[in-house]
Amino acid sequence: MRRLRRLAHLVLFCPFSKGLQQGRLPGLRVRYVFLVWLGVFAGSWLAYVNYSSYAELCRGHVCQAVICDQYRKGIISGSLCQDLCQPHKVEWRTCLSSAPGQQVYSGLWQGKEVTIKCGIEESLHPKAGPDVAPRRELVLFDKPTRGTSIKEFREMTLSFLKANLGDLPSLPALVGQVLLMADFNRDSRVSLAEAKSVWALLQRNEFLLLLSLQEKEHASRLLGFCGDLYITEGVPHGSWPGATLPPLLRPLLPPALHHTLQQWLGPAWPWRAKIAIGLLEFVEELFHGAYGTFYMCETTLANVGYTAQYDFRMADLQQVAPEATVRRFLQGRRCEHSSDCTYGRDCRAPCDPLTRQCKGDLIQPNLAKVCELLRAYLLPGAPPDLREELSRQLRACTTLSGLASQVEAHHALVLSHLKTLLWKKISNTQYS
């Protein structure tokens, strides 16, 4: 009897249970479809953002077309022009641009790995009208004008360098280098097209720095130019793993993940020590060099590059500024806070609370900013017998100020101690 009741109970309620399951299935299907749709939408949006970012940042074809148009018209000239404007002579490879106004590509020229750089003015925005090229011709290649003598061009160049580097006794020699570079075909004369090209190049901050630091081993060597487009030695390896990400996604990389990637993908610690020694030597080169003092105004791992032999190379000189340029920016500048006295990303001067004007000395000198960078770069994975002393020296280094009274002997002593400490650890090994 009991079994019969149970069977009756199952017969009565099983259809109902089945009905419940059938009622739930459509709800689950809706959720599943919604999640799939959401995934497709998010993927499409990311693809669109990356494509838009790439289209905006990577316009090397526009740069090449405009430069070659000016070359064929006889407005500009240069050692690279003939190859640049013939098919397959200069190969444009990976786009490395981080800003629309400064086009950067890896490339191949005469069998050598090179970096191609070209500035694009606002007038070259994709939405610009048909007067794009003429506007560039008039704005960028407008000096010197026809009829300018070589003496006048020499004086014009000297005045420009004085304004940007300071009144230095070494500038006439630098003017001589500029004129020698302009006369790329070595016919002992500088044509108007050659003069226009080299003048346009001088307006590019990084080119001016490259020219000033050509004799230094830690800056890339200049190989050729056409108008204001120029090429340097091949792209150095980057010390920042996030540099391989699309530019819009780089800020989204969490610091903890960045440090983990640095450990996994970066060079072994002894190689990092060798790169760090080169970076410290570069700081020395920027301080009281033949053409004045320079400030590093964007001190990030993205700018720390190295060769296949792990010799340091400054990946981007765009944010290295001459002292005269920074001081001119700060002079008489009104401020409420020190943040109002910032040149570039991190060249910051104090704000005088009485006069409400920016002071001339920077809060942090190059060495202090580099040491702050090296704490994150060198301390992870450092040998146990070195870690404590290295940490102490780097911590002391980060407290250095930019006051003129401290800059000379004290900075040189701190820098020397750091280099010695690192070099002792890797000398007489395969890493030296």
Image (spheres, rainbow, N blue to C red):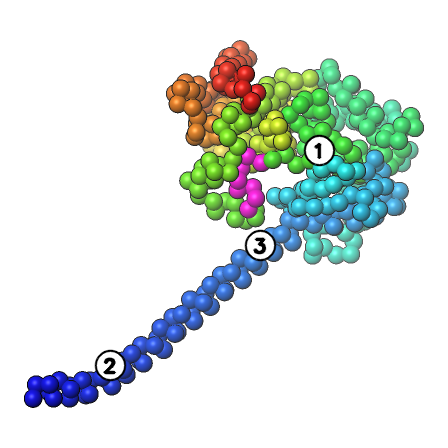
Judge whether residue 240 is colored magenta.
yes
Marks 2/3: CA–CA distance:
50 Å
Point out residue 202 in the picture as x, y percentages from the top left corner.
Answer: 74, 32
* Residue 37 vertical position relative to residue 159 in the rendered view, above or below: below
Residue carrying label 2:
17
Residue carrying label 3:
50
Judge whether residue 188 is colored magenta.
no
Marks 2/1: CA–CA distance:
74 Å
Point out residue 69 in the picture as x, y percentages from the top left corner.
Answer: 83, 48
Q: Earlier in the sequence, mark 1 or mark 3?
A: 3
Point out residue 44 in the picture as x, y percentages from the top left corner.
Answer: 54, 62
**Mark 1 Cα-neighbour bin, 10 Å: few <14, some 14–19, many ≥20:** some
Labels 2 & 3 near each other (Cβ < 8 A):
no
Residue carrying label 1:
233
Residue 181 is left or right of residue 119, and the answer is: right
Marks 1/3: CA–CA distance:
28 Å
* Residue 64 vertical position relative to residue 272 in the rendered view, above or below: below
Numbered circle sitting on residue 335: none
Highlighted range, magenta: 238-245
Give 195 or 273, whichever is nearer the viewer: 273
Residue under the point 66% across and 27% down? 219
Q: Residue farthest to the left?
A: 1
Q: Earlier in the sequence, mark 2 or mark 3?
A: 2
Point out residue 398 in the picture as x, y percentages from the top left corner.
Answer: 46, 23
